[in-house]
Image (spheres, rainbow, N blue to C red):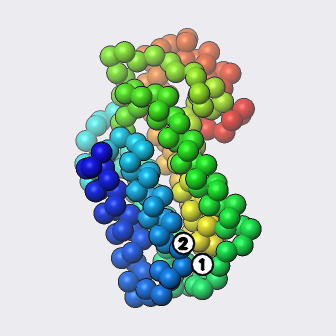
Amino acid sequence: MLKRFTLGTLIACLVVLLPVSAKFEILRAPHMWILILLGILASLLQPGYNPFTITAKPRDKGTGAQIIWSVYITQLAAILEATYWRYPASVQWNWGTTVALMAAIGGLALRTWAVLILGPLFTMHIDIQANHTVVTGGPYKIVRHPSYLGAFIMYVATIVFLQAWFSAIAALLILPLAFLRRIHYEEKLLETEFGQDYRDYAQTVGKFIPFL
């Protein structure tokens, strides 16, 4: 826990604070501090990982690194856009930023719920555990990959929260590609391992969007 807190705090501060170092007045608004808090919580509420060594598992096909760096890059782009282009409008509160913040919290809650339901079966790598089963409870009743959906919602919403519209468009293009590529390899392994049981589950529950 301490290691995840330390790493999460370090990464959140590097991604958020370092890019705004030439315009520290933006830190008078709470927005960047809220992003740091969300980043720390996201690190604490999932298994630990090292972004520089996450490519070590061959089954992942580089998908873990693709997701993590896609998130870092789009978040960094949003912070730069909000700081050096959109400021001070980027830190003004309105109904849109409030909804975006609620969506980010909701996305984090969905991902955390998915992690808690899977328990030790949840890993940062594509893998099958010794006691692995097809989990269909909790958020897995409505979508097959709620942890990825929650992360997608959270990291798009944080960009909208900063009103960084070009970065939001980029995230809507880049992040789905990363998550869907990961899901493709993950589902191939699950079908191989669980056969008809997983195919039956997949026919009744949406992959990334509930009910689709």
- Label 1: how many residues lie within 10 Å, few (<14), some (14-19) or many (20+)? many
Residue at the location (34% across, 33% down)? 59
Q: Could you say which quadrant of the image residue 37 lies in?
A: bottom left
Does the residue at mark 1 contact the one at mark 2 (Cβ under 8 Å)? yes
Relative to 182, 141 lies left or right: right
Question: Which three-letter amino acid code belongs to the residue tagged 2?
Answer: His
Residue at the location (49% across, 28% down)? 117
Assign the C terminus to one quadrant of the image. Answer: top right
Look at the picture and state if 121 lies above or below 110.
Answer: above
Kindly state the secondary structure of the residue where label 1 is placed. Answer: helix
Residue at the location (40% across, 42% down)? 46
- Label 2: how many residues lie within 10 Å, few (<14), some (14-19) or many (20+)? many
Residue at the location (58% across, 23% down)? 137
Look at the picture and state if 164 lies above or below 26.
Answer: above
Q: Which mark is residue 31?
A: 2
**Residue 185 in the image, given as x and y percentages of width and height:** 45, 33
Assign the N terminus to one quadrant of the image. Answer: top left
Residue labelled with disc 1: 91
Q: Is residue 66 visible?
A: no
Q: Could you say which quadrant of the image residue 24 lies in?
A: bottom left
Relative to 200, 8 lies left or right: left
Q: Nearer the viewer, residue 209 or 27?
A: 27
Q: Nearer the viewer, residue 143 or 36?
A: 36
Question: Which three-letter amino acid code belongs to the residue tagged 1?
Answer: Val
